[in-house]
Image: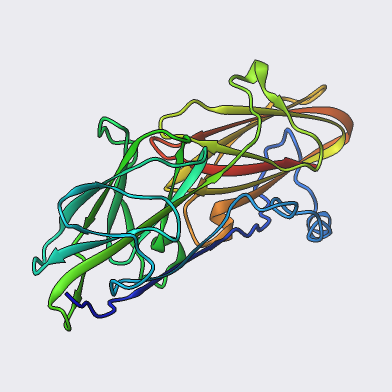
Amino acid sequence: MKRNKLFVMLLAFVMTASMMLTGLTSVFADASPAAEDSMVSDSRLLSSGRLMENRFHAMKCDGTSGVAAYVSAGSTSFLKEGTENGAVIDHGNVSGVQNTWFRIKPSRTGVMIISQGASGHIRLYDSRKRALSDDIYVNGDSTVGYMRYTVFGVKANATYYVRISSAGVYSSGSGVYMNAVKYESRAVPGSYGKSASRASRLARNKVRNGYILSKGSPKYYRFTKKGKSVKIYLDSMTDKRIQVTVTARAKGCRTYNRTISLYNSDNADDTSKRLTLTTDKSRTIHVTIRVKGYGNSSGAYSVKCV
């Protein structure tokens, strides 16, 4: 059956980093505004190589290009990875929400980006169909960038299921409701420690990337510097929320401990943070950074210390 074009799904993810000075306790004093302004030209979190840059090319749902297969709403099938693949979900003349399942096998350890052309929810499951994420609202036609896709932390060659809950988009020409789905995985390499005592050492001014699996263990990093200040740059991409705990110690100072969150958002102040820790004189500052998903959130992140 000839199908008219319903929509074009275009997903572009370009990571950007902004700087945000958060309030500090009396242990490490706030830097002066002038000092903060002078750091604007500093190497930002992702300037030496983006954590993730992914583009989903236009996908036409007219049965002629951009998709590999048609499947029926409510079915379970295998979804090939890649922007050249994808599937059109045929809802027929049923206007209500239907759950369509796809079995997937990401080719890279790190994160996967998945999007749909219609509005609805996407949820990640393990190989036994046990939920790994919450229902994440995705609308490929949204004017809000981060709502056009979602991301999940994944392992290469592991079997997952994704559930697409949507009513599709109505085509007056063909009289049916349809949706379109694509996904792609990206490698996020980077060493890490499994505990604070075995934290991975960060080199000064070098970006370290990492990924978080749903319900996965925290990852730890450490950084040591002799001086009056340490700047910590954080960036993220997540389905919901990544939590970062920073602990700093210096002789003659009380221990500094703070937990901040990085959110799924179009606002760079939510996805990226900068902490500046300062002391009254030059000291050896020891920093430990703990990164984990909040609840069952997953995704990827970058950290850099200067």
Comparing 265 with 125, the one in front is 125
Comparing 127 with 222, the one in front is 127
Q: Position of residue 237 (x, y in %)?
A: 52, 49
Inspect this view and state whether residue 231 appears.
no
Inspect this view and state whether residue 68 appears.
yes
> Number of labelled discs?
0
Picture quarter with the N terminus: bottom left
Farthest residue to the top: give it.
197
Farthest residue to the left: give it.
94
Q: Position of residue 195 (x, y in %)?
A: 60, 19
> Image height check: is 194 above or below 43?
above
> Image height check: is 128 above or below 300?
above
Quadrant of the rendered image containing residue 20: bottom right
Q: Tell me which residue sits at (44%, 61%) in the image.
A: 84
Comparing 189 with 235, the one in front is 189
Q: Position of residue 105 (x, y in %)?
A: 39, 40
> Image height check: is 22 above or below 117?
above
